[in-house]
Amino acid sequence: MEIRLTDVVLEHVGGVRALDGVSLEIPEGQACVVLGLSGAGKSSLLRTVVGLEVPTHGQLALNGTVVNRQRSRALASRIGMVHQDFALVARASVAANIASGALPAMPLWRALLGRYRLNDRARVVALHRAVGLDDALLHRRVSSLSGGQQQRVGVARACMLAPSILIADEPVASLDPQTSIEIMALLCDRARAVGATLLCSVHQVELAKRFADRIIGLRAGRIVFDGPPEQLDADALAAIFGSPRLSTDATPVKAAA
């Protein structure tokens, strides 16, 4: 599904602009990674696309259709989201958490009773295996899993309805470097498997360069870089993260006081 933002402004109480005139077109099937410091507008951009924020000005269109304040259930079911803090039900089983990804397409009564269809149950098992989890974990409480395992559950849940757009907001922020690589690879693999457009925010430069088809650099709510990973040079990093200029293969760090 194509994503298009035109002159989008997202203004919070007090006049603070989280997004300041963002225009962006992401074609169907592209893996797009958003880079920027904390407060640069990365999460605001993703939350606007997924419908958790409504632009103060400007326009969001998905596949050429302008999105209004009231989104349909059909549209909601076409967007999957992976969260930084996993956003899982800790006391529920892995299977129940994955199955909850089907809720946007279910009647309310069925959702309240947890009455999932047989094909939904089969898909839970298939996704559980597809994200690399052992069968023995399927009926374990999520709270007993490691952080990396929990994020695999989050990816599986986001893919329950074979979304057209997969949104991942800092999905590896709390994970160790090796697990971060595994989760990013998994996100890209799952997006390709269902033909979804991937929009993901990270703060690790090396991950963006390794997994993105395209990198968007945000600073103070504005796009300051837009291009392929090979163009993310020292000048581009300085525009995104500020001085001093940073090595293109290093994670950004603050200058010493």
Image (cartoon, helix red, strand yellow):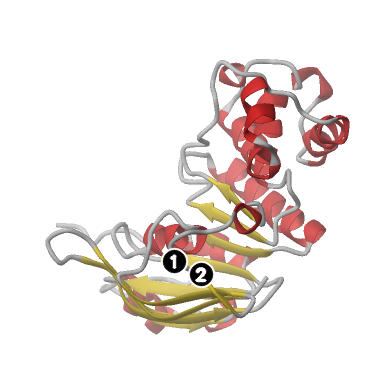
Look at the image and tell me in which quarter the C terminus lies.
bottom left
Tell me what residue is drawn at x 73 percent, y 43 percent: 160
Number of residue marks: 2
Viewer-side residue, 214 vs 86: 86
Residue 203 appears in view: no
Real-space Cα separation, disc 1 to disc 2, in angstroms: 25 Å
Which residue is labeled 1 in the image? Answer: 35
The reply to whether residue 129 is in sight is yes
Residue at 60% across / 16% down in the picture? 144
Marking on residue 99: none
Please tell me in which quadrant of the rendered image residue 200 appears. bottom right
Residue at point 31%, 65% (across, down): 40
Looking at the image, residue 36 lies above or below residue 144: below
Considering only vertical position in the picture, is 16 above or below 121?
below
Query: Of the numbered discs in the image, which one, if any, rests on residue 67?
Result: 2
**In this picture, is 241 found above or below 257?**
below
Drawn side of residue 215 relative to residue 246, left or right: right
- In the image, 12 versus 176, the foreground residue is 12
Q: Amino acid at mark 2?
A: Val
Instruction: Please tell me which residue lies in front, 21 or 230.
Output: 21
Q: In the image, residue 64 lies at what x, y percent?
A: 61, 80
On the image, the x and y values in percent for residue 216 come to 48, 74
Q: Where residue 155 appears, x then y in whole percent?
A: 66, 43
Of the numbered discs 1 and 2, the one sitting upstream in the chain is 1
Q: In the shown orientation, is residue 228 left or right of residue 117? A: left
Q: Position of residue 235 (x, y in %)?
A: 38, 83
* Residue 59, quarter of picture: bottom left
In what element is the residue under mark 2?
loop
Residue at (82% x, 31% y) in the render: 117
Element carrying mark 1: strand
